[in-house]
Structure formats: structure tokens, C-alpha cells
Image: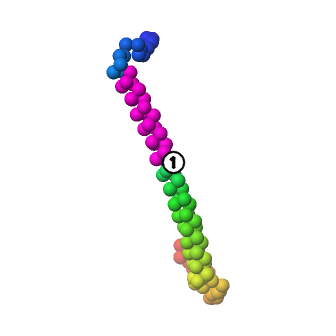
Amino acid sequence: MPQYRLQFGNLGWRGRIGLVVGIALGVAAAIALVIVSLGLALVLIPVVAVAMVIGRWRLGKTMAEATATNPRPGAGRTIEIEYSVVDEHRDGKT
């Protein structure tokens, strides 16, 4: 298996400046990404928390209204009727 080696000995001054500028841009981009991510987190976490609190409050309020104002129709009532069981085999229908 061949081994690959990077050699920077023959870069010259333009190559070294380009390498330094490239590394600096990469590090700056990574730092900017971290800062933007933290900024979004600082804004979005409280917004999501407030939305969850309001959502739970509205759900609790809706559930309380649903159970208090709308009882099931016929709850607690008993309907009495007279009935008789008909056996098909005794009627002669087979």
C-alpha cells in the first residue's frame, strides 16, 4: 500500500500566504457558524418554551371546558324495556 506524504517545503511565498489565508478563512467560518448557532439557540429556546407553556395552558383549558360543560347525553339514565328471546330451533325454522 503506497504511503502519501504532503510536502510543504517547496511551496514558495505565494503558496505559504495562500495556505495561511485559507486556514484563517476556514477558522473564521467555523467560529462564525458557532456564533450564529448560539445566537439562534438563544433566540429560539425561549420562544419554544413560551409556546409550549401557552399550548399546555390552552389544552388544559379546552379539556376542562369539554368535561365541564358537555356531559355525555344519557349519562346516569337507565332505559327499561320488555324483551323476549326467540330461539330459531324451537320455532321450527331450520
Q: Who is closer to the viewer here, 5 or 88?
A: 5
Residue positioned most to the top: 2
Give the magenta range.
16-37
Residue positioned most to the left: 14
Q: Who is closer to the viewer here, 90 or 41?
A: 41
**Is residue 46 found left or right of 33 in the rendered image?**
right
Q: Is residue 84 positioned above or below 7 on the image?
A: below
Q: What residue is shown with label 1?
A: 38
- Whether residue 59 is visible, yes or no, is no
Instruction: Describe the element under mark 1 as helix, strand or loop.
Output: helix
Which image quadrant: the N terminus?
top left
Q: Position of residue 58 (x, y in %)?
A: 55, 72
Residue 10's image quarter?
top left
Q: Is residue 15 positioned above or below 62 on the image?
A: above
- Is the stretch drawn in magenta largely helix, strand or loop? helix
Q: Is residue 26 positioned above or below 44 on the image?
A: above
Q: Position of residue 15 (x, y in %)?
A: 35, 21
Is 19 magenta? The answer is yes
Is 26 magenta? The answer is yes
Residue at figure coordinates x 48%, y 52% from the top left: 40
Residue at figure coordinates x 61%, y 77% from the top left: 64
- As shown in the figure, which amino acid type bears the numbered disc 1? Leu
Residue at figure coordinates x 61%, y 81% from the top left: 68
